[in-house]
Image (spheres, rainbow, N blue to C red):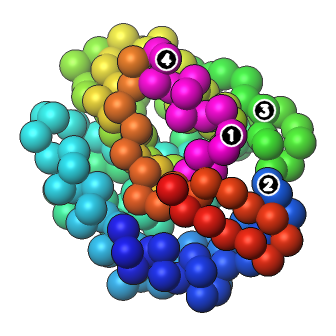
């Protein structure tokens, strides 16, 4: 997606060979017009798959996921990183390791928000090692539903995430694929 790549080059900052800061438009200060455009791209790519719901992981995936859900006219479910004390009903949970934070968390989904008839599109802001996406996949499959695709805003292609997901048979559609990061260096595939 040309507009996204342009914003990454203009406003993104590679802090080192693994960390890309894009807080000016994606995960702190959110550009709704860009998110809407991102939703358009995901809708166009995934629209023929009979998707019934979009899942995302709180919090940075919410903006692109909600815009995709809006355009596809389907519900969006936010997978929680911590089980709030207000969640008193039955849940699915799985442990996920966060590359960014260097710690584990329990990804949580209320059972009432998924059925074995659902076809799920997972949307997330970044793909690095694939742990978050694999956690979402585990929740979907534990519920007996189908993962119909995974949409990623920014993929760090030099990390193992895509390979891990593709080896398991999932279709990954990334809007910006980064080949290399370094201090003040951003290269796309």
Q: Secondary structure at mark 3?
A: strand
Q: Which mark sits nearer the N-terminus, 4 or 1?
A: 1
Q: CA distance from mark 1 to mark 2?
A: 9 Å
Q: Which residue is mark 1?
A: 159
Q: Residue 29 vs residue 121: left or right?
A: right
- Answer with the quarter of the image where residue 132 lies: top right
Q: CA distance from mark 4 to mark 1?
A: 14 Å
Image coords of residue 18 (percent x, y): 79, 54
Residues under numbered marks 1 and 2 in contact, where contact means CB atoms less than 8 Å apart:
yes
Taking 1 as reference, is 99 above or below it?
above
Q: Which mark sits nearer the N-terminus, 2 or 4?
A: 2
In this rendering, does residue 104 appear at all? yes
Residues under numbered marks 3 and 2 in contact, where contact means CB atoms less than 8 Å apart:
no
Image coords of residue 31 (percent x, y): 48, 84
Q: Which residue is mark 2?
A: 18
**Span of residues in magenta:** 155-168
Q: CA distance from mark 3 to mark 1?
A: 15 Å
Q: Which residue is mark 3?
A: 97
Taking 136 as reference, is 84 above or below it?
below
Q: Which mark sits nearer the N-terminus, 1 or 2?
A: 2
Taking 138 as reference, is 107 above or below it?
below
Q: Which mark sits nearer the N-terminus, 3 or 4?
A: 3
Dot 1, how many residues are within 10 Å of its Cα: few (below 14), some (14-19), or many (20+)? some
- Front: mark 3 or 4: 4
Q: Please name the residue shown 21% across and 50% down the image.
A: 45
Q: Residue 136 vs residue 156: left or right?
A: left
- Answer with the quarter of the image where residue 106 lies: top right
């Amino acid at each position: 997606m040309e507009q996204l790549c342009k914003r990454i080059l203009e406003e993104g900052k590679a802090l080192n060979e693994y960390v890309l800061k894009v807080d000016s438009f994606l995960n702190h200060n959110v550009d709704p017009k860009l998110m809407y455009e991102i939703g358009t791209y995901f809708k166009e790519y995934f629209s023929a798959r009979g998707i019934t719901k979009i899942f995302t992981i709180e919090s940075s995936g919410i903006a692109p996921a909600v815009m995709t859900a809006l355009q596809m006219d389907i519900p969006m479910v936010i997978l929680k990183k911590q089980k709030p004390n207000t969640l008193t009903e039955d849940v699915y949970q799985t442990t996920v390791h966060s590359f960014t934070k260097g710690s584990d968390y329990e990804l949580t989904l209320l059972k009432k928000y998924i059925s074995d008839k659902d076809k799920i599109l997972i949307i997330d802001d970044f793909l690095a090692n694939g742990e978050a996406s694999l956690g979402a996949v585990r929740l979907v499959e534990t519920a007996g539903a189908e993962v119909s695709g995974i949409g990623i805003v920014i993929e760090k292609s030099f990390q193992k995430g895509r390979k891990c997901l593709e080896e398991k048979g999932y279709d990954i559609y990334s809007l910006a694929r980064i080949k290399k990061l370094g201090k003040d260096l951003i290269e796309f595939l």
